[in-house]
Every structure is written in C-alpha cells, then in structure tokens.
Image: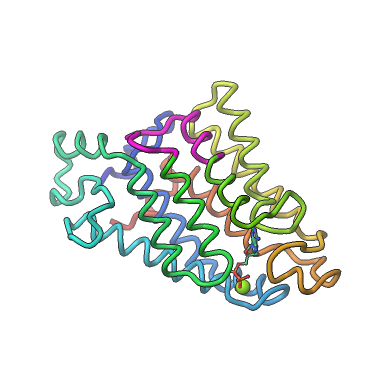
Amino acid sequence: MRAAGEVDATAGMDAAAAAAWLRGFAAEVAARRDELTELDAAIGDADHGINMDRGMQAVVNKLATAEAGGGAGGEVPADGASSGGSGSEDSAGEAAEAPLGPLFKTVGMTLVSTVGGAAGPLYGTFFLEFGKAAGDTASLSADGWAAAFSAAVAGVQARGKAEAGDKTMVDALLPARDALVAAAGAGASLGEALQVAAAAAADGMRATTPLVARKGRASYLGERSAGHQDPGATSSWLLLETAAAAVRGAAAGEADPA
Ligand code: ADP
Ligand code: MG
C-alpha cells in the first residue's frame, strides 16, 4: 500500500489510488450516515445513509479480502498490500499494472447486491459503467477519468431516467461531469480536474434545495419536496470530494487507515 505522502498530485488514478478513493468514500459515508439519513427523512424514507453505509462497508470488506489474497474477492486486484506491505519495488510495480476495470465492476456488483432502494442499483450502475470504460487501463489520466465518469453518469441516467433539475443525484453528477470534461480538455491534471468537478458537484447539490422532485420517492411529495437538499446529490458530492482527496493524497490518512 502506498503511503499517503507518496501520492503524486499530478499522477493519474491507479489501483492503489482507486482503493484509497473507495475507502475514503466509505469513510465519509459512514461519518455522515446520520446526516444523509436525516436528509432522506425530510423527503424520502430515512434510509439513504444506512443504505450507502451498508453498501460501502461491503465494498471495503471486499477490497480487504482481495488484498489479503483471499479467493472470494479475487476479482479485485490487490494493490501490493498482500506482500506484507514491504513496499518493495516489485510489488509496487505489480500494483501499477493492475487493471482498473475488474476492480470497479466488482464494486458495482457489490453495491447492486447489498443495497436496497433506488440508490444501490444507481451507484452500482455507476461503478459497473466506470469499470467497463476503464477496461484494462492500469492508470486513468484526467482524460481517461473524465471518459469513464461520463460513461458512468450516462449509465445512471439510462437506469434512472432522471434529467437535470429532477432533484436527484444526477443534479450533482452532471455539473461534475461537465467540469471534468472541460478541465481535462484544457489540459488540467487529474487532481486539478477532480477539484473543480467536486466544486461543481457541491454547487449542483446545493441547487437541489429549491427544486420540486420529479423522480424517486421524493416525487411523491410533490411541491412539499421543495426546500430540502437531495440526499443522493449529497452522497454524489462526497463521491467527487473523496476522488479528489484520494488523487491529491491529502486525505489519504483518513481514507486509508492501513
Ligand atoms: P430510496 O429512495 O429507494 O429509499 P435511497 O434513499 O437510498 O433510496 O436514495 C434516494 C436517492 O436516490 C435520492 O435522493 C435521489 O438522489 C436518488 N434517486 C432516486 N431515484 C432516482 C432516479 N430515478 N434517478 C436518479 N437518482 C435517483
Ligand atoms: Mg430512502
């Protein structure tokens, strides 16, 4: 496992950084579980934090099994921790070669199978499509990450049929995608691109507050859904924040207690 201080802010996302992202997202979801659930209590059924926490804990367990060289989670590429954390050049070299597609596909399948409700299949689809786009790539640059993220968001929209302004996670994901694609196109590093994408997701998340929900459980409330921030848009903002943190390595200490 790469130490926090060794993460290169200008580098792409390899399997070790991807694992740091997933652990960081799981940690943030766990820390904000009650907050996410309270948002869902206002316009849904008070389970979004519980759902996401259950799913991401299952993902973290799967990563740990894979890194320990276990069979069940063997589809997830280990990132070098299985060598006893020696940090030898050999194990670091192997980790750098690990394809990202299978890792993210396993994450997607784990979420689909462990999270009920709307968000599980939607986040599951996000990671399945992200993995499909990443394929055999061992490290995603800003361009590659933007392409995988775009495919992932398209998958969420194909599955949930939500458009911009429907007061869903899509309202955080779409502006993040646009910011990522623009930043990558302008030659930004992955770290820089994720930073602006996370800021765009935060704006999109806040902008859900006055909206009337047109998709999901909150839509049953009609006009009464206005005045509350969407829980799924909030967890999607965390998804971007933790990706930015994993790549710049600043939050790697929290994200990766190993
Ligand atoms: P459930 O609504 O089944 O209880 P969660 O509470 O875990 O599931 O997730 C609710 C969140 O899911 C909402 O805040 C919204 O962001 C998102 N969501 C619901 N339906 C859709 C949809 N059709 N497309 C995109 N996102 C959706
Ligand atoms: Mg709910």
Q: Position of residue 184 (x, y in %)?
A: 55, 27
Q: Is residue 114 above or below residue 107?
A: below
Residue 254 makes an appearance in the image: no
Q: Position of residue 205 (x, y in %)?
A: 69, 54
Horizontal side of residue 136 vs 248, given as left or right: left
Q: Is residue 140 magenta?
A: yes
Q: Which residue is more in the foreground, 127 or 182?
A: 127
Residue 218, by quadrant, is bottom right
Q: Is residue 253 above or below residue 59?
A: above
Q: Quadrant of ligand 2?
A: bottom right
The residue sitting at 36% across, 43% down in the picture is 101
Q: Position of residue 6 (x, y in %)?
A: 32, 37
For the C terminus, give its image quadrant.
bottom left
Horizontal side of residue 24 vs 208, given as left or right: left
User: What is the image's colouring?
Assistant: rainbow
The residue sitting at 39% across, 62% down in the picture is 110
Horizontal side of residue 66 vs 177, given as left or right: left
The residue sitting at 62% across, 42% down in the picture is 176
Q: Which residues are magenta?
A: 133-150
Residue 90 makes an appearance in the image: yes
Q: Is residue 175 magenta?
A: no
